[in-house]
Amino acid sequence: MSAYYLLLSVHSILRWLILFLLIIVIVRSIFKLNKDKIFDKNDNQFSLFLMIAAHLQLLVGIVLFFTSPNIQFYMTDIAMAMKEKSMRFFLVEHTIAMILGITFITAGRIAVKKETIDRKKFRHLLFYNSMALILIIWAIPWPFRDAIARPWI
């Protein structure tokens, strides 16, 4: 197995970790916001692990972007790539949506670190991570998406 395909597998597995952590952070935020609970060590750690996983995913994604044989081929003719749905998705749509998703995760983490009121911390986590989840789910090349489909793992 080449280094490229190994990184592609890591990128695919990290997707599941990020989705899992996003759901945990969002569900905990909803529950604790409604019950007026305190922002504890576990809330902080889940948020931190989510941000770390997202940034690791970004690094792996950047390496994949610049080493992908398909991307390299189409980078010579961007106009042709924009006409092909699959290449446009990976060159532009996937890339921008995932960077925005990771930006939302990071912004939520920063907002929580600056906030002193627990209720507002949960609101920030809920808002920013929900926005990230929407973008990330949309930008994943799920197996059931015709021209851009990728395996589950």
Image: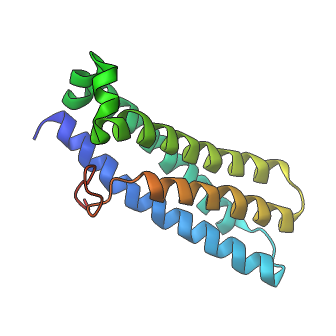
145, 108: nearer the viewer: 145
Extreme-front residue of the structure: 83
The correct choice, above or below, for 153 with respect to 28 in the image is above
145, 14: nearer the viewer: 145
Q: Is residue 38 left or right of residue 3?
A: right
Q: Is residue 3 left or right of residue 59?
A: left
Extreme-right residue of the structure: 117
**Image point 43% across, 34% down: which residue?**
92
**Does residue 47 appear in this view?**
yes
x, y percent for residue 77: 28, 18
**Image point 31% across, 52% down: which residue?**
12
**Image point 68% across, 55% down: which residue?**
128
The quadrant in which the C terminus is found is: bottom left
* Number of dots carrying numbers: 0
x, y percent for residue 144: 27, 64
x, y percent for residue 29: 70, 71
**Image point 76% across, 58% down: which residue?**
124
x, y percent for residue 64: 31, 33
Extreme-top residue of the structure: 76
The quadrant in which the N terminus is found is: top left
**Does residue 49 appear in this view?**
no
Instruction: Determine which quarter of the picture holds residue 93.
Output: top left
Q: How is the image coloured?
A: rainbow
